[in-house]
Amino acid sequence: MQGRWPPGGLVVLHGLPSCTVCRPASAYSAAFLGRGACAAWCRAYVAAGLREEARLTWNRHPGTGAVALVGIVLTCACSSSEPKRDEPIVEREPRAGTADGLLVSSAKASAGLPTELSKQSRECVACHQKMSHAVVAQWGSSRHYRAKVGCFECHQAHPNDTDAFMHYGQRIATIVSPKDCSACHAKETAEFAASHHSQGGRILGSLDNVLAEVVEGTKRLKTPAFPDGISAAAVNGCWQCHGSEIKVLDEGKLDPATWPNTGIGRLNPDGSRGSCTACHSRHRFSAAQARHPENCGKCHMGPDHPQIEIYNESKHGIAFRANLDMMNMTNDKWVVGQDYHAAPTCATCHMSATATQPVTHDVGMRISWNNRPAKSIRPEVSDAKMGLPGAKVGWQTRRKNMEDVCLACHAQAYVDSFYIQYDALIEEYHVKFADPGLKLMALAKPLMKPIKFANKIDFIWFELWHHEGRRARHAASMQGPDYTHWHGTYELAKHWYSKFIPELEHLIEQGEGSGDAGKQAASKALSEGLDEVLNSEEHRWYLGKMSDEERSRREARAKEFQQRYAK
């Protein structure tokens, strides 16, 4: 008899499914003892981290309803010339009230992986079960546990490591860096190192960090690495998302201003950049959690880059929340259009596999605009500035990569039209606000105090592009209409005309009356530049100079609207 598993029937297989082509075969037998409830069913998934399908055969006892699994046949989508690495199955306990127990046996474990936990890790577990049992419980639910990868395998250190210290007879380090993870996850860490995520620590020398360290902060937080003090606003704010520069003290201890920290671009003592636990939270390191939008929302939120808020507003976000039970989030193989189809998440679009693309940990390989700067640029341009290999990958290729994701659910005509809308918003922002704003700020510079953010207009312009302009651009890229308009272009326009233009006029007036020939010349140049901008097609309405043709057209549209909806 073939069918589906009853609720609570969570299979525990002590061993790894294998393919007779690319790895040694394994045979399994198992028995599930249920409590009846013959009419209740749920799906069970057997996955080996490859493109494998499982055909499960079992027998049901006609009286008790007990189900016995008598065979598993795996079909592997491998190639004999391209061996695949074994991936373990997550082990889970039967849920209380749904199962009496599970009887399992395995023929043999796959070659190349440890068959038991190391002596060092067993010692770690014995102690931490008493001292920090939640950590052990999390690890016990992880793929690492199933693969016999324990505490010592990740935390072991070399004598030359600056952050190494002796701990109950073992040399370890607190931080597990991407370099450490690369021992097993070489492809993933190489992709991550090539991404903008790995460069997040560059915030430490940026304009944003000047705000946090100087404008917002003080130097009241004093630590051994910062005896003269450091801003608590930067430590608890910017650094927690972008990453700190880890400072190592004597005997491998870490300075408390720089640790704990899981910032995505953390500068580690071994020279590597980043933190895998920024997305794969320790100590379970769950892929399912990393696929959830909330996982990205820790950092991608707020007034300057509200991606999680935009996603929640979008049709994609609505569909995700409404259909979470259909998303198959815990499946090892997670291909859009094959394993789930209800909605995309952040991971779906930027990282996860499609029918034709593998998983990638370079989140920039599917974006065609970098909307971070005051004026959007193509991603290969920003990659070149950072010395990243993506400098050789043009935006057209990246857009095709993203279109491939979209086409899992949408038709080509739909995708093409979406990009026409998105590109139009970017162009409109550039022409109306970014280009003239940058020009006017350059003209205003001689009339301003030389200290950044010592001028009112510094804050006005910063929020125009860094907050409102970004919100509009990001929202258009993710189909979030309210954030595109009311939180984006509306606020951008409101503050452009009610704050930015008046402050420029104030600087012109101050310069003209200063008696300083240099400032008077700068005032004249700024005044001429402002007149040119305001008399342009995009801004002349502000001066009451809308053309007769455009005015007539708008009056006709207003009249048509009133006639259509008049009672």
Image: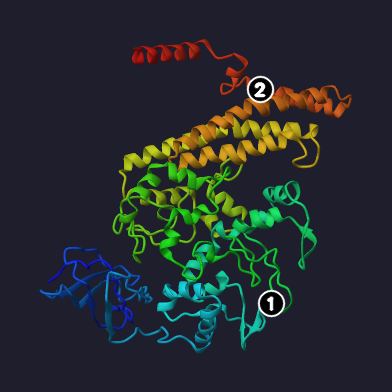
| Left or right: 499 in relation to 431 | right
Q: In this view, does 226 lie above or below 431?
A: below
Q: Which residue lies furthest to the right in this view?
A: 515
Task: Looking at this view, name the residue that lies furthest to the front.
Answer: 97
| Rendered residue at 68%/58% (across/down) | 235
Residue 364 at least partly seen: no
Say which amino acid is labelled 2.
Answer: Glu
**Looking at the image, is 52 positioned above or below residue 371?**
below
Instruction: Report the side of 480 relative to 158 (left or right).
Output: left
Q: Provide residue 273's location: percent of width, then percent of height.
A: 60, 65
Which amino acid type is shown beneath numbered disc 1?
Answer: Gly
Which residue is at a point 58% across and 81% down the rendered structure image? Answer: 156
Q: Where is residue 454 in the image (x, y as percent from the top left)?
A: 78, 39
User: What is the distance, in whole Å, between disc 1 and disc 2 at their CAs?
Assistant: 61 Å
Q: Which of marks 1 and 2 is in front?
A: 1
- Which residue was labeled with disc 2? 532
- Packing grade of label 2 (10 A; few <14, some 14-19, many >=20) is few
In the figure, is residue 119 to the left or right of 68?
right
Q: Is tag 1's residue or tag 2's residue first in the polypeptide sequence?
A: 1
Give the residue at mark 1.
252
Observer-nearest of 356 and 279? 279
